């Protein structure tokens, strides 16, 4: 085993081994059932995208997966161990990037802060934070405050913070929702590159079906009320993707229409249900 | 050039007032309101440098120690109470009661137990000026962005680091706003406790001069008090500008 600074999975896991297992996960808020029994297994090293309508409970699901919120029923296990608090090998990129960075810390200090609590010495902390910031192309902005950067750059700081933490799995909640289209495409490719380079597992929530298909090895479609898994689509688009070429392929078009139909069908059954209830 | 303009803009009114005072009082024959020129002359004789050593330095030390204690206790207790909302609710009536009791009202009790020495003075300054810092710290800690707390949990930040890198810096602008008020209270309490206390200190000097009808000395003491207040405020602003660098830039 070599000691390269690349954060990779330390323990023995092959590419198709189960990393994160979600069994019958349900979550209610005061009698209001949001998640109604989610079952899914995330494989080590895969890129899984989660799509579903607004309010379906995608953020809630990520919070349960990370141990930030306790599920009402069911369980989450990471490498066979029950998740009850945020695991050390998991990092999260939050939906609200501008509010998830500390405005009083420089970019470098923001990225290095989690390492401080992990009792990593100053020199090593700085080295790891710099490596992560270089990975996301921000090495010339490390001494600025986050709010001095553009939205897309702030999101890259949040990604660098996750990478510096050397996780084996990263959860991302609509990470590119509030940046412009060009920045969004850049960040998508950056994420794909980083994932390939570091061999981490990524679970990414998005509203955007194109984005989900473009990024994912598998797309998890959520729907119905209370929310369950309505489909799990394997993309088979290979490890190398291109914003123009990949999106122009027939496979891509088929995948996106399959996911789109799942979400629409689910919308229709929902409204049919509510009409029936009224009548 | 911009800096120069700022200095001019800030100082025209004080300069005008001093000049007015100088001119209007120049031929004053009143025993109680002597000419400013005579006051300044006395200031030079009386304060440089014996008076500074005997009276200004003790006052300065008292207010710095007292205010420093108020800062430390106010922030530490404020963070603890801010992190324990249930406990804070339970003792809130007590806090409100203590806060709304004017600090100097406790002076008779304080002299009873602590005498009239430096211990009592520093204690009174700290006690009376602590409240704005304490209450603002509690508010600041309470109002931390929930997303940041989720970040802290998910990246397993230790409690020490949450306090040092999230709660305290988030509250810092509010703590400084409270501390500014506290500093003003501290100056008042300093003068009052010195007036009832033992020799050594600007407050004592002013009252003693008045009692012995040394009106020029009294006025020179009042002017020195103004200078001390100005210097304290200036120092405060320097520290604030340094610590709240991010906040000032972000909001400009
Ligand atoms: N802490 C909470 N207390 C009560 N209800 C909550 C709480 N958190 C979420 N909910 C409810 O759970 C449902 C799902 O919310 P969630 O934020 O998980 O949806 P989402 O799929 O992430 O939506 P979006 O795509 O808009 O981000 C919503 O109806 C919301 O009102
Ligand atoms: Mg959400």
Image (cartoon, coloured by chain):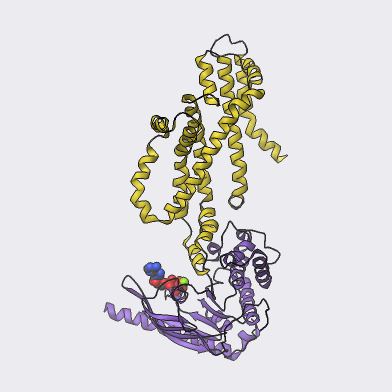
Using the image as rendered, state which of residue A73 and residue B108 is in the foreground: B108
Query: Image height check: is A81 above or below B21?
Result: below
Q: Is residue B27 left or right of residue A79?
A: right
For the image, the number of numbered tags is: 0
Q: Specify whether A167 is left or right of B126.
A: right
Of the 4 image quadrants, the one containing the N terminus of chain A is bottom right
**Quarter of the image where the C terminus of chain A is located:** bottom left
Q: Which chain is purple?
A: A
Residue B248 shows in the view: no
Q: Residue furthest right?
A: B1
Position of A158 relative to A206 (above/below): above
Residue A274, percent from left and from top: 32, 78
x, y percentage for residue A211? 56, 79
> From the viewer's perspective, is residue B88 above or below residue A189?
above
Q: Nearer the viewer, residue B231 or A247?
A: B231
Quadrant of residue B39 in the image?
A: top right
Q: Colour of chain B?
A: yellow
Please provide percent x and percent y for residue A39: 42, 85
Res. A92 in view: yes
Quadrant field for ligand 1: bottom left
The front one of A115 and A95 is A115
Residue A81's spot in the image, x, y percent? 46, 81
Name the quadrant containing residue A106.
bottom right
The foreground one among B47 and A209 is B47
């Amino acid at each position: 085993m070599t000691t390269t600074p690349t954060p990779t999975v330390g323990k023995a896991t092959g590419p198709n081994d189960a990393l994160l297992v979600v069994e019958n996960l349900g979550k209610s808020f005061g009698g209001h059932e949001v998640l109604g029994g989610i079952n899914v297994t995330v494989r080590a090293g895969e890129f899984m995208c989660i799509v579903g309508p607004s309010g379906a409970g995608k953020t809630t699901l990520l919070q349960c997966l990370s141990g930030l919120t306790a599920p009402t029923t069911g369980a989450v296990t990471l490498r066979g161990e029950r998740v009850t608090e945020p695991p050390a090998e998991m990092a999260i990129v939050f939906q609200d990037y501008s509010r998830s960075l500390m405005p009083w810390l420089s970019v470098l200090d923001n990225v290095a802060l989690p390492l401080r609590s992990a009792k990593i010495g100053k020199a090593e902390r700085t080295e790891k934070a710099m490596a992560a910031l270089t990975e996301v192309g921000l090495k010339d902005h490390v001494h600025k405050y986050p709010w001095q950067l553009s939205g897309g750059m702030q999101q890259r700081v949040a990604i660098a913070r996750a990478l510096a933490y050397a996780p084996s799995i990263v959860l991302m909640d609509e990470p590119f929702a509030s940046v412009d289209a060009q920045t969004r495409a850049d960040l998508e490719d950056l994420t794909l590159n980083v994932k390939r380079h570091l061999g981490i597992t990524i679970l990414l929530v998005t509203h955007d079906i194109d984005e989900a298909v473009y990024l994912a090895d598998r797309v998890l479609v959520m729907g119905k009320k209370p929310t369950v898994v309505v489909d799990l689509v394997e993309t088979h688009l290979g490890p190398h993707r291109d914003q123009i070429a990949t999106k122009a392929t027939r496979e891509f078009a088929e995948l996106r229409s399959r996911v789109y139909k799942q979400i629409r069908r689910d919308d229709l059954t929902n409204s049919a249900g509510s009409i029936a209830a009224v009548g | 050039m911009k800096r120069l303009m700022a200095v001019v803009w800030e100082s025209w009114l004080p300069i005008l007032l001093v000049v007015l005072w100088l001119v209007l009082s120049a031929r004053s024959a009143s025993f109680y309101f002597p000419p400013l020129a005579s006051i300044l002359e006395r200031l030079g004789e009386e304060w440089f440098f014996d008076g500074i050593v005997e009276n200004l330095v003790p006052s300065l030390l008292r207010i710095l120690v007292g205010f420093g204690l108020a800062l430390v206790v106010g922030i530490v207790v404020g963070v603890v109470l801010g992190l324990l909302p249930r406990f804070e609710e339970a003792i809130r009536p007590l806090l409100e009661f203590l806060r709304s009791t004017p600090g100097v009202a406790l002076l008779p009790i304080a002299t009873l137990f602590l005498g009239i020495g430096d211990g009592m003075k520093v204690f009174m300054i700290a006690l009376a000026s602590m409240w704005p810092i304490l209450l603002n710290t509690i508010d600041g800690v309470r109002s931390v962005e929930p997303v940041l707390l989720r970040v802290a949990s998910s990246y397993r930040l230790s409690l020490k680091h949450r306090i040092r890198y999230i709660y305290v810096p988030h509250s810092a602008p509010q703590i400084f706003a409270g501390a500014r008020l506290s500093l003003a209270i501290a100056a008042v309490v300093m003068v009052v406790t010195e007036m009832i206390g033992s020799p050594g200190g600007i407050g004592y000097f002013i009252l003693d001069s008045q009692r012995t009808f040394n009106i020029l000395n009294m006025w020179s003491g009042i002017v020195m008090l103004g200078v001390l207040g100005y210097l304290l405020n200036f120092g405060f602003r320097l520290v604030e500008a340094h610590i709240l660098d991010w906040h000032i830039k972000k909001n400009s």
